[in-house]
């Protein structure tokens, strides 16, 4: 830091003004319906997703596609296809490092300090809509890393639920290839996986035993009532497919199922918008979460 | 802070010979920005800038950045004023002046990181003020840009003490102002206030610089101070902090500053804070590019 500053050439990502403005309209529609926000520099990803759908539908221009996307009665169906396109490939182990950092550096110290006053040292975590298990395994490995420190003497229970039976079976098997493991460091691969064949790794039994997988429909009110006592709930890119009324109902269940002082996490660029005013939106470095305030915290 | 410490800070800031000379146009520009826009003449700004070609050139580079979204790039300060508006050009000029004021060799804090935070906060403040129609948006930008002036003072006047504070902050993951208080007994708020008073920056700016970590102290500009406080927190949580992991949780809506704004501006209830956050993320890359343009990049310094 000693030389005189020199003006540098300006590094630019695809210039926002080069993106067809229709994609901003589509971005706003997607946010309004699903809570997923594609930032300006990620608009090209949205454009790619739209491009694939346009090909399927034979739409010539983004404007044609917009017309099809907003026309009744096909609107809901096409939006669902588009959401599938733009969330595809989002599943992998260690998907969101800022969430994991917040968990280890801020949330676990806070929750364990709070719960130390209680008799039982038990932490309950729920990965709702866990697909093929990448998220609950990531959480289990993260917790195991803390087992000699913050979580020494604690019982950790992780629940992984999904609507799809085949996903649940795949999750139980815990077998992953390169793509799912693209964000997993060698350290974690060596410590928590065994080599299944030349292309795939399998999660070790000591990780698996922290998790119970089961099928659950988040819209099944009677079953949702039994999911109480959670400290952390993760629900990534699942609520985006629900309509407003169902979404509100499921979010209320999540709120009820969380302990006071517990946290609810969505996908990286996903928000509850303003569907629930009981949760507090809280920021950690690089990520947001929804917090069920402790009993002694009021709201302005 | 005791009055003896306060007097020491004031004396050292007043007495130092090493404080770099600020570009000639800086203080007249600040004066213009503090007056109402009707009183400001375009020709006066153009005349001022013509004294300093380096600043004029930098200003044009910044005005051409994607952050300002101009379809046609300006070729002169006058055309920049016509395209962007006078007050926005003034704040760009102010940014360029600050870039010249503090030479890189004097820093003990990474200057790129500092400027990213200051520019980020400036942009958040402008966005807040535009959404709430509360404070003049360019005034909000300026307050965000200058709120951490005290860090510059610390680098220049208290380099050893400040280095210990930054080391503690990085090691423990605590906010920098808390680390300053623990190691130095005072913070950048007090040193910034001393410089702001020396530069006669006006009561509102002095208040922002002095109290942006404690909005309850506000006497003259509560809404402006609250915006800067929230902007500072938000930037620190979204990749525009001080380059280390702050082990903290920020609940903006429960923050007293949110309450201050909400009392006067009910529109705030309608703001979707998550979306506001995601929109800030959009600007991060552009802010980094802007910092590289105005202040030089880290690679240029290594």
Image (cartoon, coloured by chain):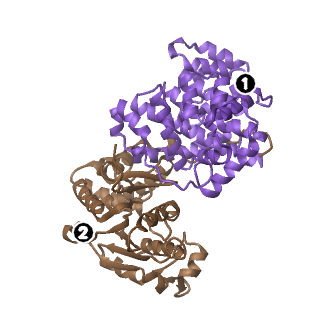
Chain colours: A brown, B purple
How many numbered discs?
Answer: 2
Q: Secondary structure at mark 2?
A: helix
Q: Secondary structure at mark 1?
A: loop
Residue position marked by numbered label 1 in the rendering: B23
Question: Can you say whether A32 is above or below A87 in the image?
Answer: above
Q: Residues within 10 Å of mark 2 (few under 14, many from 20)?
A: some
Q: Which is more toward the observer, B237 or A64?
A: B237
Residue A104 is at least partly visible in this image: yes
Residue position marked by numbered label 2 in the rendering: A224
* B117 sits to left or right of B136: right
Whole-number angstrom distance, CA of label 2 to CA of label 1: 65 Å
> Which residue is situated farthest in the left direction here?
A222
Q: Residues within 10 Å of mark 1 (few under 14, many from 20)?
A: some
* A119 sits to left or right of B230: left
Query: What is the quadrant of the N terminus of chain B in the image?
Result: top right
Chain assignment, label 1:
B
Question: Can you say whether A86 is above or below A273 in the image?
Answer: below
Residue depicted at x 45% and y 56%: A48
Kindly check if marks 2 and 1 are in contact, taking CB atoms under 8 A apart as contact: no
Residue B218, horizontal then vertical, whole percent? 49, 30
Q: Which is more toward the observer, A56 or A195?
A: A195
């Amino acid at each position: 830091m000693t030389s005189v500053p020199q003006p540098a050439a300006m590094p630019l990502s695809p210039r926002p003004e080069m993106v067809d403005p229709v994609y901003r309209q589509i971005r706003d529609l997607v946010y309004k319906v699903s809570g997923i926000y594609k930032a300006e520099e990620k608009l090209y990803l949205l454009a790619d997703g739209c491009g694939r759908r346009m090909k399927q539908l034979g739409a010539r221009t983004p404007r044609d596609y917009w017309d099809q996307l907003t026309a009744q009665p096909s609107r809901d169906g096409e939006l669902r296809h588009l959401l599938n396109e733009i969330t595809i490939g989002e599943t992998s182990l260690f998907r969101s490092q800022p969430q994991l950092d917040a968990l280890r550096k801020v949330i676990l110290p806070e929750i364990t300090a709070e719960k130390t006053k209680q008799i039982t040292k038990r932490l309950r975590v729920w990965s709702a809509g866990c697909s093929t298990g990448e998220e609950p395994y990531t959480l289990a490995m993260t917790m195991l890393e803390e087992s000699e420190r913050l979580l020494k003497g604690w019982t950790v229970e992780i629940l992984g639920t999904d609507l799809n039976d085949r996903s649940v079976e795949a999750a139980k098997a815990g077998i992953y290839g390169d793509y799912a493991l693209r964000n997993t460091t060698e350290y974690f691969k060596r410590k928590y996986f065994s080599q299944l064949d030349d292309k795939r790794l399998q999660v070790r039994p000591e990780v698996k035993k922290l998790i119970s997988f089961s099928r659950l429909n988040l819209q099944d009110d009677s079953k949702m009532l039994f999911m109480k006592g959670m400290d952390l709930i993760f629900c990534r890119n699942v609520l985006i497919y629900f309509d407003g009324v169902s979404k509100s109902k499921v979010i209320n269940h999540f709120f009820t199922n969380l302990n006071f002082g517990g946290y609810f996490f969505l996908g990286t660029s996903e928000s509850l918008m303003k569907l629930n005013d009981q949760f507090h939106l809280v920021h950690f470095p690089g990520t947001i979460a929804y917090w069920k305030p402790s009993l002694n915290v009021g709201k302005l | 802070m005791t009055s003896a410490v306060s007097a020491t800070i004031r004396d050292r800031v007043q007495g130092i010979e090493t404080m770099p000379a600020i570009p000639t146009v800086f203080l007249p520009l600040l004066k213009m920005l503090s007056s109402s826009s009707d009183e400001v003449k375009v020709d006066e700004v153009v005349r001022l800038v013509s004294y300093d070609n380096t600043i004029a050139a930098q200003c044009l580079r910044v005005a051409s950045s994607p952050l300002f979204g101009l379809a046609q790039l300006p070729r002169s300060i006058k055309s920049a004023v016509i395209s962007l508006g006078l007050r926005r050009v003034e704040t760009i000029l102010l940014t360029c002046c600050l870039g010249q004021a503090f030479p890189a060799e004097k820093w003990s804090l990474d200057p790129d990181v500092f400027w990213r935070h200051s520019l980020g906060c400036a942009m958040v403040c402008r966005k807040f003020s535009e959404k709430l129609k509360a404070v003049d948006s360019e005034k909000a930008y300026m307050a965000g840009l200058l709120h951490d002036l005290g860090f510059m003072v610390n680098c220049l006047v208290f380099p050893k003490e400040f280095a210990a504070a930054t080391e503690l902050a990085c090691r423990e993951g605590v906010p920098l102002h808390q680390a300053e208080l623990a190691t130095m007994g005072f913070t950048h708020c007090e040193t910034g206030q001393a410089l702001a008073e020396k530069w006669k920056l006006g009561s509102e700016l002095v208040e922002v610089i002095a109290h942006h970590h404690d909005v309850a102290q506000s006497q003259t500009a509560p809404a402006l101070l609250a915006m800067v406080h929230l902007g500072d927190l938000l930037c620190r949580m979204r990749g525009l902090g001080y380059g280390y992991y702050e082990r903290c949780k920020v609940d903006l809506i429960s923050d007293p500053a949110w309450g201050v704004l909400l009392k006067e501006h009910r529109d705030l209830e309608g703001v979707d804070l998550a979306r506001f956050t995601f929109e800030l993320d959009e600007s991060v890359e552009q802010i980094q590019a802007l910092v590289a343009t105005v202040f030089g990049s880290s690679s240029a310094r290594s």
